[in-house]
Every structure is written in C-alpha cells, then in structure tokens.
Image (spheres, rainbow, N blue to C red):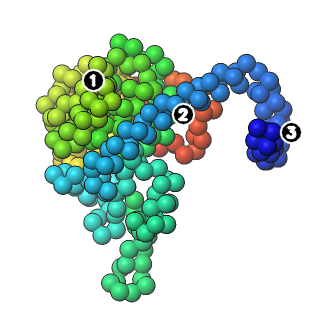
Amino acid sequence: MFVDIINAKSRLLDVFADLDDDELIAMEQWIGSKQYKKDLENKKSLIKSDEAITKIVDVIKGMVPFEAEMASEKIEYPIVGDAADCNKVNTRHVDEFLYDEEQVQELVKDGKLSRHYCIDCNSQNIKELTYISHSKSRLQLQYIYKVLLPKDLECKLILDVGSRFGGVLYGAYYFTNASKIVGIELNKECCEVQEKIISQFKMGKRIQVVNSDVLNKGDLVAKSDVCIINCLDFFVSTEEHKRLWYFFKEHLKKGSYVVLDRSIVDTLQPLDIFDEFADWLSVSKPMQLENEILFDVEELHQLYLYIVN
C-alpha cells in the first residue's frame, strides 16, 4: 500500500512539474475544494458505465466480421466532400466503437492491420492508408451525453439515424436517463446484432431498434428530442444524401437537438445545398460544460451540437 501511494504521488508530481505558477495555484484550489470530490465521483461513474459498454463491445466483436462491415451492407464511396478521395484500395474501415486508438496500435503491431498500401505491386512505393469509422468511439459517446447534451433527458426521445451495431443506443442507455432510445437501421443484419445485444443485456425497456429506411419514418423523426445523425456519406449516393437532408429539415421539430460528427457547413456545402439550410440550425454551446474536466477535449473537437430553429 505504501509503495502504491508513493507511486501515485510521483505521477502527480510529474503532472505538477509541467504547470506554471498560476496553473499550480488553480490545481491546489481545485484539489482542496468540494468540487474536486464531485468531479472524482463523476469520473468514477463514467468509468463504471464504460466498463459495462466494454462488455457489450466484446460480445459484438464475436458477432461481426473483423472489418465490421456486414456482407449485406452496400458501401458507397463518396464522390464529393472531404472523403471523396477514399476508395477500396486506399481506405480501410476500423470501427471506433469496437476498437479504440490503443487497440488499433496493438493490431498494427501484431500485423492484423497495416498502416500502408503499395501503389506499385511488389515495390516499396507505398502510401499511408486512410482509416475511417462508420461508428462513434466510446469516448465520443461519453462526451456527447456527458458534455454536449442536457443532463436531464427523462421523458425525452433520443433517435439514432443509422444505428448499425447500436453503440449510440448503448451509450444513451448507460450515460443518460432518457426514457426512450430508438435506432433506425436499414441493414437487417445490423439490426439482428442490436436486437441480440439488447436482449442479452436486458435493455429492452428503454431501447428499440427499427429496421427501416429513415425516409419511411417521418413520424418517428418528428417525435425525437435528440437526433444523432451518423456520417451518411458511405451508405448513400450524392442525390440520396441530399434527399435525406431535405427530409430532416422537413420533419425535425423546432427546439430539438441535432448531433453531428461534421459541421453542417462541411456536410452540406459539398452537396451544393447549404444556402437552403442556412437558417435551419443554430449552434448550441455544450449543455454540461462543467463536465469537460472529465475529458481531453482536444480529441473531441469533431462533434457538433445544434438546435433546430
């Protein structure tokens, strides 16, 4: 025990050594305050909830292919936007809900993943692969529910468009008090994975999965209080992508929250339709800003919260 305390003090001193005088004073005040204890309690709660989600992740890994793209899924490589240079040769899918950055490094080290591809076969003329994810990471989910969105979501409906294996749904279950959590997913195989997980971990009272094209569920979209829209580029054509945004604009109710992993400007400008949506959404500040202390926010800048006008 004594050695553990010494090691803990040593790690703290390493952190303190990098602080200037003003930062050190602020740290001393924080550690000496009641707020420190509250922040620590919140951090422990976050870790406990993430451990529950990690158990789900381990089960899903045994249910889906390593690349986490189902055989029945139709992948459409974008022809506009910041992913327009992605193709079958230079792009690999690594699902961030299933594999965090540390695990990816281990996979590369073990030879299960490569960082590069050969431009000219059998030569040393290589380029770095582009890694994409069709899912949000567990850290992103924590940040969405513990920083971006309001704390109290009781009697609210969280809707995930393109729920795939259900990561956003499980995050909402463990990190919020939302009464109803619904995922819309077009692919039947992905829905089957979600249904099995929901049943196995007994989450059916709050989570529902709908196997449908979201365009056929305008009534459900209109009821949502929070709509989380995953990156759609790799699953629809450019024209279908446009149609989806017109649909969201028509059905999402005033005052509801929209969470995106790309700004609305960067999403719609490549589609040449942003001008028609300029007054549709307003940027919202994080609703639980006090919880940013639980995260390294520099790693989470690619998450955006909007309110429907």
Q: Which residue is mark 1?
A: 204
Residue 248 visible at all: no
Give the residue drawn at x 39%, y 87%.
123
- Looking at marks 2 and 3 on the same chain, the residue that comes earlier in the sequence is marked by 3
Check whether the beta carbons of the residues at disc 1 and disc 3 lie within 8 A of each other.
no
User: Residue 132: image x %, image y %?
Assistant: 37, 55
User: Residue 181: image x %, image y %?
Assistant: 31, 24
Q: Quadrant of residue 36?
A: top right
Q: State the residue lying farthest toward the bottom.
A: 123
Q: Amino acid at mark 3?
A: Asp
Q: Amino acid at mark 2?
A: Ile
Q: Which mark is residue 260?
A: none
Q: Which residue is mark 2?
A: 47
Q: Which mark is residue 21?
A: 3
Label 3 element class: helix
Give the residue drawn at x 24%, y 26%.
208
